[in-house]
Image: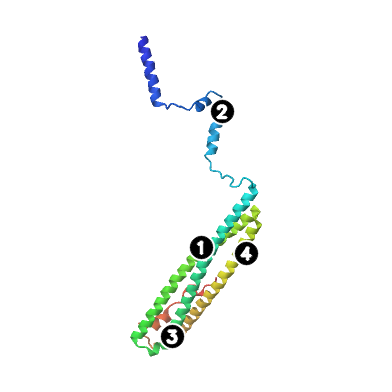
């Protein structure tokens, strides 16, 4: 009976060793010899160590100085973002404006030569005009995309300037605000050039529509060909984008 009890105890002990990992670190085992408060303090300390906290890169500087420096770095980054988006928008708007003027020029030449061209020449010129219209629409979509990026960059820069001011980095805040005003002026001037080109195109197309309606009254005294490129130009509605005001 005694031997049976010893075997049972030994089997239980062996099973425990297989299922429960044995801690070899004596310092860790020593924690359990003290009070439960010591165990709790170790657990809390380990949790805090898991939280990523930046350390001082330069221990000699105060927290205020480090925050100012960080705010200045943020303003530098936002200025770079704003400069790049401004450049992209100006370049895109400029190309768009050039294409609008090109389209106006092509349509003016077509109108002046329409009665002197044969059908093949007329069709060839009209294909060039259609290509210019497609290019203008593509460039318009492109500059609208860059305009959205530029608007976000301005908002981010304004937030960075405010953060720098609150952090005490006054010079960095002033620099960003001046930069914002500068790029806003540049974009405004470029937009005005684009609006002038759009207004010229819209005025020319409106004049063409009036002229076509005058040459072809509703009573049908002067019927026109439905296949005529000039007829297609006159019937075309003026795009809303040409008439909008920013």
- The residue that label 2 is drawn on is 38
Alpha carbon distance from label 3 to label 1:
37 Å
Q: Residues within 10 Å of mark 2 (few under 14, many from 20)?
A: few
Q: Check disc 2 and report its element: helix, strand or loop.
A: helix
- The residue that label 4 is drawn on is 178
Q: Check disc 4 and report its element: helix, strand or loop.
A: helix
N-term-proximal mark, 3 vs 1: 3
N-term-proximal mark, 3 vs 2: 2
Extreme residue toward the top, this view: 1
Tag shown at residue 109: 3
Extreme residue toward the left, this view: 120
Tag shown at residue 149: 1
For residue 130, what is the image quadrant?
bottom left
- Nearer the viewer's eye, disc 3 or disc 4? 4
At x 46%, y 82%, the residue is 105
Q: Residues within 10 Å of mark 3 (few under 14, many from 20)?
A: few
Q: Position of residue 57 (x, y in %)?
A: 58, 47
The answer to whether residue 221 is visible is no
Q: Residues within 10 Å of mark 1 (few under 14, many from 20)?
A: some
N-term-proximal mark, 2 vs 1: 2
Tag shown at residue 81: none
Callout 3–callout 2 Cβ contact below 8 Å: no
For residue 156, what is the image quadrant?
bottom right
Callout 1–callout 4 Cβ contact below 8 Å: no
N-term-proximal mark, 3 vs 4: 3
Q: Check disc 1 and report its element: helix, strand or loop.
A: helix
Alpha carbon distance from label 3 to label 4:
45 Å
- Nearer the viewer's eye, disc 1 or disc 4? 4
- Nearer the viewer's eye, disc 2 or disc 1? 2
Question: Which residue occupies the foreground of this view, 172 or 133?
Answer: 172
């Amino acid at each position: 009976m005694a031997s049976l009890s010893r075997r049972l105890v030994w089997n239980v002990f062996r099973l425990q060793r297989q299922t429960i990992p044995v801690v070899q670190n004596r310092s860790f085992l020593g924690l359990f010899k003290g009070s439960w408060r010591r165990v709790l303090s170790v657990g809390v300390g380990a949790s805090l160590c898991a939280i990523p906290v930046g350390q001082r890169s330069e221990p000699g500087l105060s927290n205020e100085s480090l925050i100012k420096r960080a705010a200045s770095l943020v303003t530098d980054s936002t200025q770079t973002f704003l400069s790049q988006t401004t450049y992209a928008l100006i370049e895109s708007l400029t190309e768009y404006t050039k294409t609008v003027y090109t389209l106006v020029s092509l349509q003016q030449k077509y109108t002046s030569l329409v009665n002197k061209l044969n059908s093949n020449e007329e069709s060839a010129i009209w294909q060039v005009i259609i290509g210019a219209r497609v290019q203008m629409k593509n460039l318009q979509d492109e500059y609208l995309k860059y305009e959205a990026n530029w608007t976000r960059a301005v908002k981010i820069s304004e937030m960075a300037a405010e953060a720098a001011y609150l952090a005490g980095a006054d010079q960095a805040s002033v620099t960003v605000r001046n930069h914002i005003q500068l790029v806003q002026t540049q974009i405004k001037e470029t937009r005005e050039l684009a609006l002038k080109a759009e207004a010229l195109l819209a005025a020319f197309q409106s004049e063409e529509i009036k002229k076509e309606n005058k040459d072809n009254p509703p009573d049908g005294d002067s019927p026109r060909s439905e296949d005529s490129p000039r007829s297609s130009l006159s019937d075309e509605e003026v795009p809303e984008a040409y008439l909008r005001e920013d």
